[in-house]
Amino acid sequence: MTPESQSLSGRSVFITGAARRIGAAIATELHAAGM
């Protein structure tokens, strides 16, 4: 299954460690994807 085939519509995520670089990068990418 490719990331493009999975819709983020109506989903939620809980990211810990966003103050550090890995969590912040995940949050940035999810935001850019419309999450």
Image (cartoon, rainbow, N blue to C red):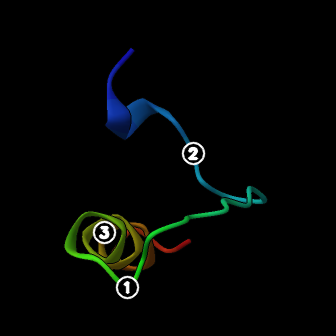
Secondary structure at badge 2 equals loop
Task: Name which residue type carries label 3.
Answer: Glu
> Label 1 vs label 3: CA separation?
15 Å
> Which residue ends up furthest to the bottom in the rendered image?
19
Task: Name which residue type carries label 1.
Answer: Ala
Q: Find residue 9 and report its horizontal and vertical position in percent.
A: 68, 58
Q: Find residue 8 and report its horizontal and vertical position in percent.
A: 59, 53
* Left or right side of 13 for 21: left
At x 73%, y 61%, the residue is 12
Q: Is residue 9 above or below residue 25?
A: above
Q: Which residue, given by chain and number where applicable, does mark 2 sit on?
A: 7
Q: Which residue, given by chain and number where applicable, does mark 1 sit on?
A: 19
The image quadrant of residue 25 is bottom left
Of the numbered discs 2 and 1, the one sitting upstream in the chain is 2
Q: Nearer the viewer, residue 21 or 10?
A: 21
Of the numbered discs 1 and 3, the one sitting upstream in the chain is 1
Packing grade of label 1 (10 A; few <14, some 14-19, many >=20) is: few
Q: Find residue 11 and report its horizontal and vertical position in percent.
A: 74, 55
Front of the two marks 1 and 3:
1
